[in-house]
Every structure is written in C-alpha cells, then in structure tokens.
Image (spheres, grey):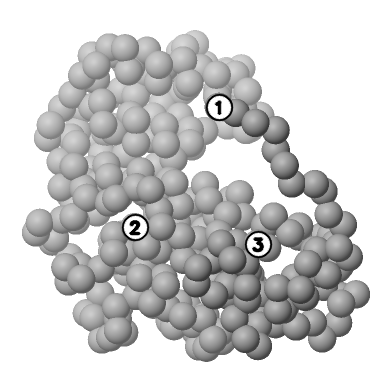
Amino acid sequence: MKTSFPKPYSTPKKIVQILRSRGMHFSDEGKAESYLMNIGYHRLSAYIFPFYKSPKNDLILKDGTTFEQVMTLYRFDKKLRIVLFNEIEKIEVAIRSVLANIGCQELGDKYWITKAEYFANADKFRQTLAVIEKELAASKEGYIENFRQNYIEDYPPAWMITEVLSFGNLNYIYTNIANNRLRKLIADYFGLKPQVFTSWLTVLANLRNMCCHHARVWNRDFMLSPAEPRKASKVWIDTSTLDKKKVFYRLCIIRYFLSAVSPNNNFNSKIADLLSKFPSIGIMAMGFCKDWKDEPLWQ
C-alpha cells in the first residue's frame, strides 16, 4: 500500500549538520554547502554511500570520512563518464556508417532501410519507419533539408538516415534485417557474431545514455548482462571470474570494438592514466581483475 513520502526538504546547511552528526569531517563547511547547492545532496548521496559502515542502514560513516573524499569520488566518476562517452562516440559513428555501407553494398539498394522487403518483421519495420519519418520531419540538418527540397524520393538514402537515428534505433533496424548474410557481414566487421553484436550494442547504448544523463557508473551494478562471445575473432579477455554487470566488463567491450574501428586508439592509456590520478579509488568495486593491465586486450 502506498504512503506519503516522509522525508522533508533540508537546506544544504542542514545537510552539512546531518552529515557531521553521522561522522563526516569538513575542512570548509561553506564550500561544502555550495557543492550541495550546485550538485545536490540526492546526487552526491550515491558517492557518500560507500563510506557508511555496515550495516549501511545505520547511517554511521567510517572513521575519518571527509567531504573531500566524497568529492574526489564524484570527480573521478565524472571524468570516467567523459572518457567513456568519447570512446562510445567513435563506436556509434562507425556503426552508423558500417550499417549503411554494407547494407547498400550487399543489397544493391541505397534506399534499403525504408523498404519493407528487406526486413523480417513487418510490425517492427512499420514502427521503425514511423521513427524515421518523425526524425526526418524534425531534422534541421542541411543535408536533409537539401534532399527534401531538391529530390523526388520520399526518403533519403541509407547513409543519411542512419545519421538522424538514435543508437537504439540502429540496433532495432539491425535485429530486424531479414538477410542473414547481411547481418553476419555487419557483425563480422566488428569481429562478432550477430547475437553478441546485438547484445553489446544494447549495453553500449545504455551506458552512453547514463553518461549523457550524468548517472553514476563507477561502481554501479548494471541491469543488463552482456552476451559472452564463445569464440572472438579479435583479442578478448578471460571473463570467467569477471562480474558482467560491473563497468570493467563494459570497458572491455569498448576496447574490443575500438580494435576494429580505431586500431591505434589510446583508450588503454586513458583508463590507466585516470586511475593513476585517483589512487584512492577502489577498482575492485568497478569489477577490475587484479592484473588487468597484463591482459592482451589491454596491451
């Protein structure tokens, strides 16, 4: 049975007092109040939680816990999200281009994305087409407006359409492709089987959205469990002891994709440098294996 939300609003000054009563130390309470005003206690509470003693519900902080420790954790997570978003962008751009390119090459039809005969499920195709029409109508991109004004076709070619669709929409299109050979060719470009490719796209789209919305990722238990490649064509990692719901597994997925779309990338050094700048961060909470730097995937 539902009830009224019981917690009252507390000002940043009051929250500082509450946290102090739980054992938190402040070097500058005024600065802490400013952070609480500009970031919000609700957001910061996720970074305070790891510092509570067990049982967590008692809300007693570990001895010596400081507000600066909380802010260090918050800043680390922010920088991690920025790194992840930048690398996922490379993968997303590649998937847009590869889907359009290989589809046009294999089917010999530059308008294939908007034709029902190339898709397995008619209802899914109609839903996708409705999304395409909505995105095209709303788009202010110069190339879309130029096509609309100068050409008689109802829809632009595939390489234009893939640019206006979301990451999730691209995956929805991919999973509905009727031509098995085409699905295999697209997945194979990234060194994956179609089932794993679809799973990993879903996982990366979810992670990307979290990064866009500034959600905590560093120690999160993600809801989605990625499919495991039985036989990867590129260097992979021994995941038998890894927690697939932690962020490290997702870092491995990104690293694997980048080996196909950006072979000379420095993602491994970016992660290593970030961790070295925040030595207080417990990487076990992120799902890292002990000797992760020695894994061929991270060389």
Question: Which mark, residue 261?
Answer: none
Instruction: Classify residue 161 as left or right of residue 145.
Output: left
Position in image of residue 22 (x %, y %) = 70, 73
Looking at the image, which is closer to me, 258 or 115? 258
Looking at the image, which is closer to me, 27 or 216? 27
Question: Which mark, residue 45?
Answer: 3
Q: Amino acid at mark 3?
A: Ser
| Residue 124 visible in the snapshot | yes
Q: Amino acid at mark 2?
A: Lys
Which quadrant of the figure has residue 229? bottom left
Q: Residue at x 40, y 20 (%)?
A: 128
Q: Residue at x 15, y 47 (%)?
A: 193
Mark closer to the chain start, 2 or 1:
1
Q: Which residue is mark 1?
A: 1
Q: Amino acid at mark 1?
A: Met
Q: Which residue is mark 2?
A: 245
Q: Quadrant of the C terminus?
A: bottom left
State how many labels appear: 3
Give the spatial CA distance, label 3 vs label 1: 27 Å
Which quadrant of the figure has residue 53? bottom right
Give the spatial CA distance, label 3 vs label 2: 21 Å
Instruction: Classify residue 196 as left or right of residue 129.
Output: left
Q: Nearer the viewer, mark 3 or mark 1?
A: 1
Q: Residue at x 63, y 23 (%)?
A: 138
Q: Quadrant of the N terminus?
A: top right
Mark closer to the chain start, 3 or 1:
1
Q: Is residue 121 above or below residue 234?
A: above
Give the spatial CA distance, label 2 vs label 1: 32 Å
Position in image of residue 104 (x %, y %) = 28, 32
User: Mark 1 and mark 3 in contact (Cβ < 8 Å)?
Assistant: no
Query: Within 10 angstroms of label 3, few (less than 14), some, or many (20 or more) residues?
Result: few
| Residue 80 visible in the snapshot | no
